[in-house]
Amino acid sequence: MMVCETLHERYPAVRRMLIEAEDEILAFYAFPAAHLAATWASIRRVREAT
């Protein structure tokens, strides 16, 4: 929430979006470490292919 408070004055719309998307933003923390490693590897492969 510190980020949201920092953005409050200059970027109220961004602050609202972050607050509304909090569950989605933090959801990946519940993933097992092995799953995250596979996800990052996939992202890396996609970036290298483009």
Image (cartoon, rainbow, N blue to C red):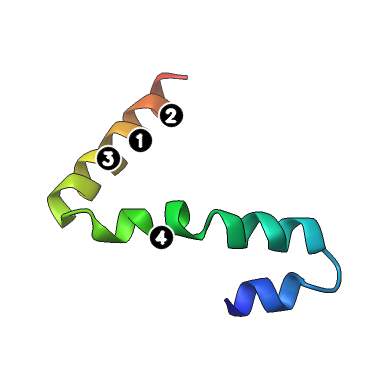
Mark 2–mark 3 Cα distance, whole angstroms, equals: 13 Å
Distance in Å between CA atoms under marks 1 and 4: 21 Å
**Farthest-out residue, right:** 10
Give, as a three-letter code, the residue at label 3. Thr
The front one of 6 and 19 is: 19
Q: Identify the residue under disc 1.
A: 44
Work out whether 46 lies above or below 8. above
Q: Residues within 10 Å of mark 1 (few under 14, many from 20)?
A: few
Across and down, in percent, residue 21 comes to: 54, 54
Indicate the position of residue 20 as horizontal and vertical percent values: 59, 56
Secondary element under disc 1, as helix, strand or loop, is helix
Could you say whether the residue bearing mark 4 is in a helix, strand or loop?
helix
Mark 2 residue element: helix
Asked which quadrant contains residue 15, the reply is: bottom right
Q: Which structural element holds mark 3?
A: helix
Query: Disc 3 designates what residue?
Result: 39
Q: Residue at x 33, y 54 (%)?
A: 28
Task: Identify the residue under disc 4.
Answer: 26
User: Which of the two discs, 4 and 2, sits closer to the camera?
Assistant: 4
Q: Nearer the viewer, residue 49 or 11?
A: 11
Amino acid type, mark 2: Arg
Residue pointed to by mark 2: 47
Query: Which mark is in front, 2 or 3?
Result: 3
Crowd around label 4: few <14 · some 14–19 · many ≥20 (10 Å):
few
Q: How far across and how far down the image is residue 40, in percent?
A: 30, 43
Q: Earlier in the sequence, mark 1 or mark 4?
A: 4
Query: Does label 3 or label 1 sit earlier along the sequence?
Result: 3
* Label pair 3/1, CB-CB below 8 angstroms: no
Label 3 or label 4, whichever lies nearer to me, is 4
Asked if disc 1 and disc 4 are in contact, CB closer than 8 Å, the reply is no
Distance between the alpha carbons at the discs numbered 4 and 2: 23 Å
